[in-house]
Amino acid sequence: MQATILVVDDTPSNIAVLSEILRGDYRVLAAINGEQALKIARSDPPPDLILLDVMMPGMSGHEVCQRLKAESSTRKIPVIFVTAMNQVEDEAHGFELGAVDYITKPVSPPIVTARVKTQLALYDQNRELERMVHERTAELSHTRMEIIKRLGRAGEFRDNETGMHVVRVAHYCRLLGEAVRMNEEDVDLLFNAAPMHDIGKIGIRDNVLLKPGKLEDDEIKIMRQHVPFGGEIIGEHTDGLLSMARVIALTHHEKWDGTGYHRGLKREEIPLVGRITAIADVFDALTSVRPYKKAWPVEDAVALIKRESGTSFDPELVQKFVAILPQILAVREKYSDTPQVGMAGGGPIP
């Protein structure tokens, strides 16, 4: 497939000369001013290289180059200035603006051919390298997220044989994040970080974590240690995903009125992702079978969350949760554990 060259010059004869040199090997487009050049450059697909005159009425070639390099869609297109301005300072200024080469007028056909061929080869090489880096980065990102999910499920397997609790919580969190209009990047981070919320349960001994009855006061204190344990297991990172996972692990048992744990945060002191995960976690814990309880009916779990609005939970998030309940229930059904009869009794993790 032929590469596309955009020739920009306000003098038709100059366009004709360059077109004649290039037409046999490349598809040539032409623009007689800066506005036309920018419009063509923004088209789909964009040109592979631009030969740009500097001295043009209206928008100069320098200004065109500046605008091209300021836009993400055109920034990477190589620009070669074709101009009679051949002073060192002129060339230096052009390179500062982002041009990759200079061709002086009157043009020499062998020089034009050689410079265009060289820059196109470099451009193709750079695009292939970017594609490979992007592909490898995507693979590493996917692997990292899968490891985090599996670690989350490993923690959950200790008191839930299927480990599906963390999967459902992740989906509930994503739905709530979208409902409160979190940006797409943060929703994605939330979805992938939420499975780590209870990773600290790995550090809780079995006779407490798996106790089939009500916990004693000293056992409740031990159980609550899964929050700081989670923070320690994840650690402090600059990575956005692990950083959010740590925040969620440390704050998903905080309560709106300040009576939660581990730090007794209240209202907006609790990070939004912690407030979201709190509702998702409690709803799923209530409606799931655990060693210490049977599953609650959905309507009873929703009623409790409504009652706890303004005390345990962010009132706005409770409203959003109720509004998206049909989507929540669809997720619950899709990622269910073994079929179970919903019976009242018990309660969420203390």
Image (spheres, grey):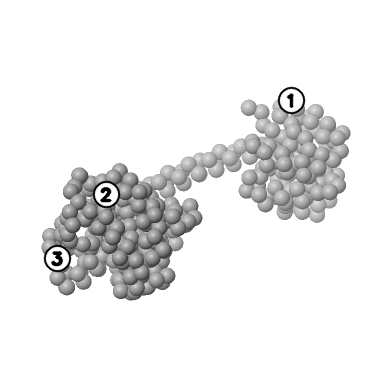
Q: CA distance from mark 2 to mark 3?
A: 23 Å
Question: Pointer 2: what residue?
Answer: 164
Residue at 44% from the left image edge and 62% from the top image edge: 238
Q: Amino acid at mark 1?
A: Gly
**Is residue 82 in view?**
no
Q: Residues within 10 Å of mark 2 (few under 14, many from 20)?
A: some
Position of residue 126 measured from the top left corner of the image (x, y, whole percent): 59, 41
Question: Pointer 1: what residue?
Answer: 24
Position of residue 218 measured from the top left corner of the image (x, y, whole percent): 16, 73
Question: Pointer 3: what residue?
Answer: 214
Q: How many marks?
A: 3
Task: For marks 2 and 3, give the one nearer the viewer.
Answer: 3
Position of residue 34 measured from the top left corner of the image (x, y, whole percent): 78, 45
Q: Amino acid at mark 3?
A: Lys
Residue at 34% from the left image edge and 73% from the top image edge: 257
**Secondary structure found at label 2:** helix
Q: Amino acid at mark 2?
A: Met
Q: Nearer the viewer, residue 13 or 298?
A: 298
Q: Nearer the viewer, residue 293 or 92?
A: 293
**Secondary structure found at label 1:** loop
Q: CA distance from mark 1 to mark 2?
A: 62 Å
The image quadrant of residue 303 is: bottom left
**Secondary structure found at label 3:** loop
Residue at 36% from the left image edge and 56% from the top image edge: 322
Q: Is residue 32 left or right of residue 160?
A: right
- The first of marks 1 and 2 along the sequence is 1
Task: For marks 1 and 3, give the one nearer the viewer.
Answer: 3
Q: CA distance from mark 1 to mark 3?
A: 84 Å
Position of residue 130 measured from the top left corner of the image (x, y, whole percent): 55, 43
